[in-house]
Amino acid sequence: MSSSSGAMTSTTGSSTAGRGTAGGRGRLGHRLSGAVIALGCVLFLGAAVWAAVVYRPYTVPTNSMVPTVQPGDRLLAQKVSGSDVHRGDVVVFKDKLWGNEPLVKRVVGVGGDTVSCCDAKGRLMVNGKAIDETYLKGGGPASLESFRTRVPAGEIFLLGDNRAVSEDSRIHLADAEGGSVPVSDVRARVDGVAWPASRMGLLSPTSAFDAVPGSGSPGQGPLGPLTIAVIAGAALILGGAAYDPVARLFRRR
């Protein structure tokens, strides 16, 4: 009897110790899952709030920027000063001589530039340098009409990527500024397409103007990192929330 009782006591003690170890692991896992959820919330909410402060949504009103953006696309555009835009940037602007609605065009010339078209290959010329505009619909020519203008200081010259139909700086060449608009007219720089889902993504910066001295790289805001942070945050929240149900399921087996 004494020997048997001792064996039972040993077994019971071992079982209790096992449950204690499993309970410790469970509490640790629960705390870790809570920390993961908290980190996910910080990433998700922080990036979402930052994006809401920095970006504004705009809808493309015409087909003048096809194929880069399509009519009806919902764009995310970063609020920037007009003095911060570079050749190649796609911008949202509003000018009283161009109408009452915000428009979307590409900057091809900045203050002091001489913009002309076209060379023998149908390419746009900026300060005597031929521009290979790979983003144009149909691949060119850069303009069906020849023109030459000098961009005044503090202004920009804008063209649509769908040159055959775009109503842009070319139709305002007879204006006092020769088709240019003040940089103060710029509302934002387009960084990406938010909707429709089939076209969602970042706009690729162009290298077309790299050959122009003093060109500067087209600007690109924090939309890419912010998008990654939102996705990572959502994944951490879902993963952390799933830990307890999954752990309970395995403990029952």
Image (tube, rainbow, N blue to C red):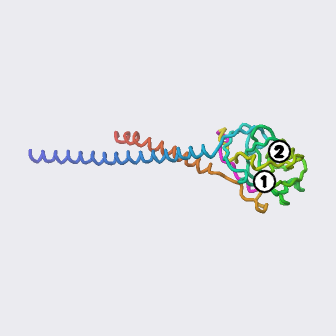
Q: Which residue is mark 1?
A: 154
Residue 159: x %, y % from top left: 81, 47
Query: In this picture, which residue range is highlighted in magenta?
Result: 197-207
Which circle, 2 or 1, is nearer the viewer? 1
Q: Which residue, as the protein is rendered here, is positioned at the far bottom?
A: 213
Classify the position of the C terminus by image quarter.
top left
- Please give the name of the residue rendered at 72% of the width and 37% of the height, measured from the top-left corner: 72
- Please give the name of the residue rendered at 49% of the width and 44% of the height, measured from the top-left corner: 41
Residue nearest the viewer, comparing 121 with 191: 191
Residue nearest the viewer, comparing 213 with 2: 213
Task: Identify the mark at residue 168; answer none if there is no mark.
Answer: 2
Of callouts 2 and 1, which one flags the residue occurring earlier in the amino acid sequence? 1
In the structure shown, which secondary structural element does the residue marked by tag 2 occupy?
A: loop
Determine contact: label 2, label 1, CB under 8 Å: no
> What is the spatial separation of the Cα atoms under label 2 and label 1, in whole angstroms?
18 Å
Q: Is residue 112 above or below residue 2?
A: below
Residue 231: x %, y % from top left: 55, 45
Let me know if residue 206 is in the magenta part.
Answer: yes
Let me know if residue 228 is in the magenta part.
Answer: no
Residue 182: x %, y % from top left: 78, 49
Three-letter amino acid code of the residue under disc 1: Gly
- Please give the name of the residue rendered at 80% of the width and 55% of the height, measured from the top-left corner: 153
Q: Residues within 10 Å of mark 1 (few under 14, many from 20)?
A: some
Three-letter amino acid code of the residue under disc 2: Asp
In the structure shown, which secondary structural element does the residue marked by tag 1 occupy?
A: loop
Residue nearest the viewer, comparing 85 with 3: 85
